[in-house]
Image (cartoon, rainbow, N blue to C red):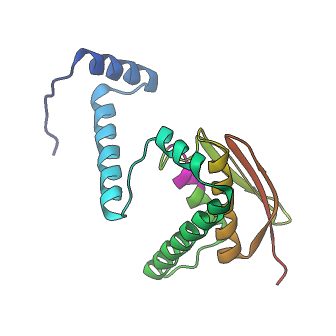
Amino acid sequence: MSKTLGIRLDEETEELLDSLSETMNMKKSRLMKQAFHEWALIKQQIQTENKILCDRILLAQLFQIIPDENISEIAETVSEHIISIIKIRQIERNLEESIETFLNNYTTFSSLQRSGWFQNIDYTIDEDGKISIYGIHSLNHQYSKYASELISKILLKKFNYIQKEKRTTDNSIILEFIKAKE
Protein backbone atom coordinates (compact mmCIF):
# COMPACT_ATOMS: atom_id res chain seq x y z
CA MET A 1 0.00 0.00 0.00
CA SER A 2 1.22 3.48 -0.84
CA LYS A 3 0.54 6.74 0.99
CA THR A 4 0.98 10.36 0.01
CA LEU A 5 3.19 12.59 2.13
CA GLY A 6 3.59 16.34 1.71
CA ILE A 7 6.79 18.18 2.59
CA ARG A 8 7.91 21.81 2.54
CA LEU A 9 11.06 22.70 0.64
CA ASP A 10 12.98 25.94 0.63
CA GLU A 11 13.57 27.49 -2.78
CA GLU A 12 17.19 26.31 -3.04
CA THR A 13 16.28 22.69 -2.25
CA GLU A 14 13.40 22.78 -4.71
CA GLU A 15 15.70 24.09 -7.47
CA LEU A 16 18.22 21.35 -6.70
CA LEU A 17 15.47 18.71 -6.77
CA ASP A 18 14.18 20.05 -10.10
CA SER A 19 17.68 20.02 -11.58
CA LEU A 20 18.48 16.50 -10.37
CA SER A 21 15.11 15.23 -11.53
CA GLU A 22 15.70 16.58 -15.01
CA THR A 23 19.34 15.45 -15.19
CA MET A 24 18.54 11.94 -13.97
CA ASN A 25 15.32 11.74 -16.01
CA MET A 26 13.45 10.71 -12.89
CA LYS A 27 10.23 11.95 -11.31
CA LYS A 28 10.79 14.07 -8.21
CA SER A 29 8.81 11.71 -5.99
CA ARG A 30 10.87 8.71 -7.14
CA LEU A 31 14.11 10.66 -6.69
CA MET A 32 13.16 11.67 -3.15
CA LYS A 33 12.10 8.10 -2.32
CA GLN A 34 15.42 6.75 -3.63
CA ALA A 35 17.39 9.43 -1.75
CA PHE A 36 15.57 8.57 1.48
CA HIS A 37 16.26 4.84 1.06
CA GLU A 38 19.96 5.50 0.36
CA TRP A 39 20.20 7.78 3.40
CA ALA A 40 18.46 5.17 5.59
CA LEU A 41 20.81 2.42 4.33
CA ILE A 42 23.88 4.55 5.06
CA LYS A 43 22.55 5.43 8.51
CA GLN A 44 21.84 1.76 9.25
CA GLN A 45 25.32 0.70 8.08
CA ILE A 46 26.95 3.34 10.24
CA GLN A 47 25.06 2.17 13.30
CA THR A 48 25.31 -1.59 12.80
CA GLU A 49 28.83 -1.85 11.35
CA ASN A 50 30.61 0.55 13.72
CA LYS A 51 31.39 3.08 10.98
CA ILE A 52 31.61 6.85 10.86
CA LEU A 53 31.14 9.36 8.07
CA CYS A 54 34.12 11.54 7.31
CA ASP A 55 34.38 14.48 4.93
CA ARG A 56 36.90 13.97 2.08
CA ILE A 57 38.72 17.19 2.93
CA LEU A 58 39.21 16.10 6.54
CA LEU A 59 40.24 12.61 5.49
CA ALA A 60 42.77 14.03 3.01
CA GLN A 61 44.24 16.21 5.76
CA LEU A 62 44.47 13.22 8.11
CA PHE A 63 46.27 11.12 5.50
CA GLN A 64 48.58 14.05 4.72
CA ILE A 65 49.98 14.09 8.27
CA ILE A 66 50.45 10.34 8.58
CA PRO A 67 54.16 9.52 8.20
CA ASP A 68 55.08 7.00 5.50
CA GLU A 69 56.23 4.44 8.08
CA ASN A 70 52.76 4.48 9.69
CA ILE A 71 50.83 3.95 6.45
CA SER A 72 51.83 0.28 6.38
CA GLU A 73 50.86 -0.20 10.05
CA ILE A 74 47.41 1.28 9.45
CA ALA A 75 46.93 -0.87 6.34
CA GLU A 76 47.99 -3.94 8.35
CA THR A 77 45.40 -3.28 11.05
CA VAL A 78 42.61 -2.56 8.57
CA SER A 79 43.52 -5.61 6.45
CA GLU A 80 43.14 -7.85 9.51
CA HIS A 81 39.74 -6.30 10.18
CA ILE A 82 38.58 -6.79 6.58
CA ILE A 83 39.84 -10.39 6.47
CA SER A 84 37.94 -11.11 9.71
CA ILE A 85 34.75 -9.66 8.23
CA ILE A 86 35.22 -11.77 5.09
CA LYS A 87 35.74 -14.92 7.21
CA ILE A 88 32.61 -14.24 9.28
CA ARG A 89 30.52 -13.75 6.13
CA GLN A 90 31.94 -16.97 4.69
CA ILE A 91 30.95 -18.87 7.82
CA GLU A 92 27.46 -17.31 7.85
CA ARG A 93 26.89 -18.15 4.18
CA ASN A 94 28.83 -21.41 4.20
CA LEU A 95 30.83 -20.22 1.18
CA GLU A 96 34.48 -19.88 0.25
CA GLU A 97 35.15 -16.51 -1.35
CA SER A 98 37.02 -16.53 -4.67
CA ILE A 99 39.48 -13.85 -5.74
CA GLU A 100 36.95 -12.66 -8.35
CA THR A 101 34.18 -12.36 -5.78
CA PHE A 102 36.45 -10.48 -3.40
CA LEU A 103 37.64 -8.05 -6.10
CA ASN A 104 34.11 -7.45 -7.30
CA ASN A 105 32.90 -6.76 -3.75
CA TYR A 106 35.93 -4.61 -2.90
CA THR A 107 35.70 -2.43 -6.00
CA THR A 108 31.93 -2.06 -5.62
CA PHE A 109 32.27 -1.12 -1.94
CA SER A 110 35.07 1.40 -2.68
CA SER A 111 33.20 3.08 -5.54
CA LEU A 112 31.21 6.30 -5.48
CA GLN A 113 27.97 4.31 -5.34
CA ARG A 114 28.89 2.85 -1.93
CA SER A 115 31.59 4.21 0.37
CA GLY A 116 32.94 6.80 -2.06
CA TRP A 117 36.64 6.14 -1.49
CA PHE A 118 37.23 6.15 -5.25
CA GLN A 119 35.47 8.02 -8.04
CA ASN A 120 36.35 5.05 -10.23
CA ILE A 121 37.94 1.72 -9.29
CA ASP A 122 38.02 -1.51 -11.25
CA TYR A 123 40.11 -4.62 -11.89
CA THR A 124 41.00 -7.10 -14.61
CA ILE A 125 42.31 -10.65 -14.50
CA ASP A 126 44.18 -11.76 -17.62
CA GLU A 127 44.44 -15.29 -19.03
CA ASP A 128 47.65 -15.89 -17.03
CA GLY A 129 45.94 -14.95 -13.77
CA LYS A 130 47.65 -11.55 -13.43
CA ILE A 131 45.41 -9.09 -11.60
CA SER A 132 45.41 -5.38 -12.38
CA ILE A 133 43.61 -2.99 -10.04
CA TYR A 134 43.28 0.66 -10.99
CA GLY A 135 41.44 3.56 -9.43
CA ILE A 136 41.05 7.32 -9.30
CA HIS A 137 40.28 9.25 -6.10
CA SER A 138 40.38 12.86 -4.91
CA LEU A 139 42.40 12.62 -1.70
CA ASN A 140 46.23 12.69 -1.90
CA HIS A 141 49.35 10.60 -2.45
CA GLN A 142 49.34 9.31 1.13
CA TYR A 143 45.88 7.85 0.53
CA SER A 144 47.14 6.23 -2.69
CA LYS A 145 49.95 4.62 -0.68
CA TYR A 146 47.50 3.44 2.00
CA ALA A 147 45.00 2.03 -0.52
CA SER A 148 47.71 0.12 -2.39
CA GLU A 149 49.19 -1.24 0.88
CA LEU A 150 45.74 -2.33 2.08
CA ILE A 151 44.85 -4.15 -1.12
CA SER A 152 48.32 -5.76 -1.27
CA LYS A 153 48.11 -7.06 2.30
CA ILE A 154 44.63 -8.54 1.80
CA LEU A 155 45.50 -10.23 -1.49
CA LEU A 156 48.65 -11.75 -0.01
CA LYS A 157 47.08 -12.97 3.25
CA LYS A 158 43.78 -14.14 1.84
CA PHE A 159 44.62 -15.30 -1.68
CA ASN A 160 48.46 -15.62 -1.81
CA TYR A 161 48.92 -12.95 -4.50
CA ILE A 162 52.05 -10.80 -4.44
CA GLN A 163 52.42 -7.32 -5.79
CA LYS A 164 54.35 -7.26 -9.05
CA GLU A 165 54.01 -3.57 -9.86
CA LYS A 166 52.75 -0.46 -8.08
CA ARG A 167 52.23 3.04 -9.43
CA THR A 168 50.67 5.66 -7.20
CA THR A 169 50.06 9.35 -7.77
CA ASP A 170 48.29 12.09 -5.86
CA ASN A 171 44.96 10.77 -7.10
CA SER A 172 45.40 7.29 -8.59
CA ILE A 173 46.61 3.75 -8.09
CA ILE A 174 47.63 1.15 -10.64
CA LEU A 175 48.56 -2.19 -9.11
CA GLU A 176 49.50 -5.55 -10.61
CA PHE A 177 49.56 -8.87 -8.77
CA ILE A 178 50.60 -12.41 -9.58
CA LYS A 179 49.98 -15.63 -7.73
CA ALA A 180 52.88 -16.44 -5.36
CA LYS A 181 54.72 -19.71 -5.85
CA GLU A 182 53.49 -22.30 -3.39
Where residue 19 appears, x then y in whole percent?
A: 39, 18
Image-based side of 59 in relation to 145, left or right: left
Give the magenta-colored segment's residue range.
107-112
The answer to whether any part of residue 17 appears in the image is yes
Picture layout, residue 82 above or below residue 45: below
Report if residue 20 lies within the magenta region: no
Q: Name the residue rendered at 14%, 34% in the picture.
A: 4
Question: Farthest residue toward the bottom?
Answer: 182
Report if residue 110 lies within the magenta region: yes
Predominant secondary structure, magenta span = helix
Where residue 46 appears, x then y in whole percent?
A: 34, 56
Picture layout, residue 172 above or below residue 153: above
Q: Place residue 131 in its image quadrant.
A: bottom right
Q: Name the residue rendered at 62%, 49% in the picture.
A: 143
Q: Name the residue rendered at 81%, 76% in the picture.
A: 180
Picture layout, residue 76 above or below residue 137: below
Where residue 83 appears, x then y in whole percent?
A: 55, 73
